[in-house]
Image (cartoon, helix red, strand yellow):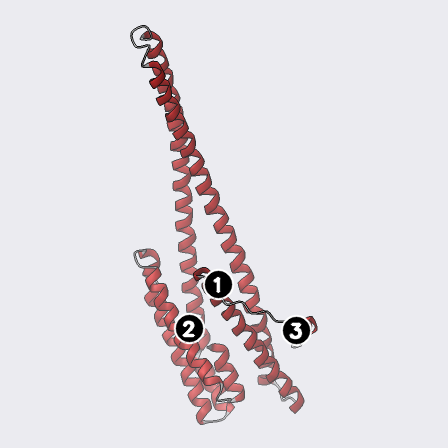
Amino acid sequence: ADSAARAFLLTRNPSLLPQLRDAQAQAVDRVEQLAGLSAGNPAVEQRVPHLREAVRRMNTRLAAVVATREAGTIGDALDAARSADTSGARSDIRRIIADMEREELRQLAERRTAADQAYERAVGGRVGSAVVSGALLVAVTLLSLRHARGRADREASLMESERRAREAAEREQEARAEAELANRRKDQFLAVLSHELRTPLNAVLGWTQILQVSKVEEATLARALASIRRNAEAQQHLVEDLLDVSRILAGKLPMERASVDLRDVVAQVVEAMRPD
């Protein structure tokens, strides 16, 4: 939504307005989905109203900037954007999301500690089982003459107890390994996602700053606007890729084959780095 508003501020292209409104509506829907997912988790659920308010404030300020641009010049819109201070709402959204992530990591650490304790209890139970096994063997030895027929049953019961203890210890180890692997994969995914989302945004911000602080030639202006739009569309494609992850999990992702010209990819990277 922020990218679409910036693009409209610069170009006043009416075709960008549906994208802006769709993005704002999707942001609100995502907050409500998050509210449903966090139900029953008070530590995370209590932050959802603050996130909802920050998103509402962000959408309101973007709408005000767009309305100013529709009614006036780009100078009026830039003044409105500065007075709206959308960066404050954006910072609040990032801070609240960061707090939610920290809370999830804390809960994951608690679960990991609980798994470790369960593993220790399983090991302790195995030692206790060994002690009980020794006592049973002594009892079987003393009563072997009177209970010869029951010896096989007692030994089978002992072996079953030890097998269950081993299986319990193995299950605890597997659960802990799965939790650690899931945590590492989540960290790797967030790192890659942050880098990929930041790359086109840097190009947009770079060209926007150049256009704001200096007068540029017509050719440079056209190239700047083309680069801003291209990188905005690239970031939109990244968001669509994230939505594809949800479709993959639901088993509803359609596959389409297409050729890719690597020269275009290299040219886009060079263009994105040109403001720097």
Q: Position of residue 144 (x, y in %)?
A: 33, 8
User: Which residue in the protein does label 3 denote?
Assistant: 273
Q: As shown in the figure, which amino acid type bears the numbered disc 3?
A: Met
Is the residue 78 above or below the residue 186 in the image? below
Mark 3 and mark 2 in contact (Cβ < 8 Å)? no
Q: Earlier in the sequence, mark 1 or mark 3?
A: 1
Is the residue 201 above or below the residue 179 in the image? below
Q: Residues within 10 Å of mark 2 (few under 14, many from 20)?
A: many
Give the foreground label among 1 and 3: 1
Disc 2 secondary structure class: helix
Splitting the image into 4 quarters, where does residue 62 fall?
A: bottom left
Residue visible at 39% across and 46% down in the picture: 110
Q: Earlier in the sequence, mark 2 or mark 3?
A: 2
Residue visible at 32% across and 12% down in the picture: 149
Q: Which mark is residue 245?
A: 1
Disc 1 secondary structure class: helix
Label 2, label 1: how far apart the Cα atoms are: 27 Å
Q: Which mark is residue 89?
A: 2
Give the foreground label among 2 and 3: 3
Task: Report the quarter where the C terminus lies.
Answer: bottom right
Disc 3 secondary structure class: helix
Q: As shown in the figure, which amino acid type bears the numbered disc 1?
A: Val
Q: Residues within 10 Å of mark 1 (few under 14, many from 20)?
A: few
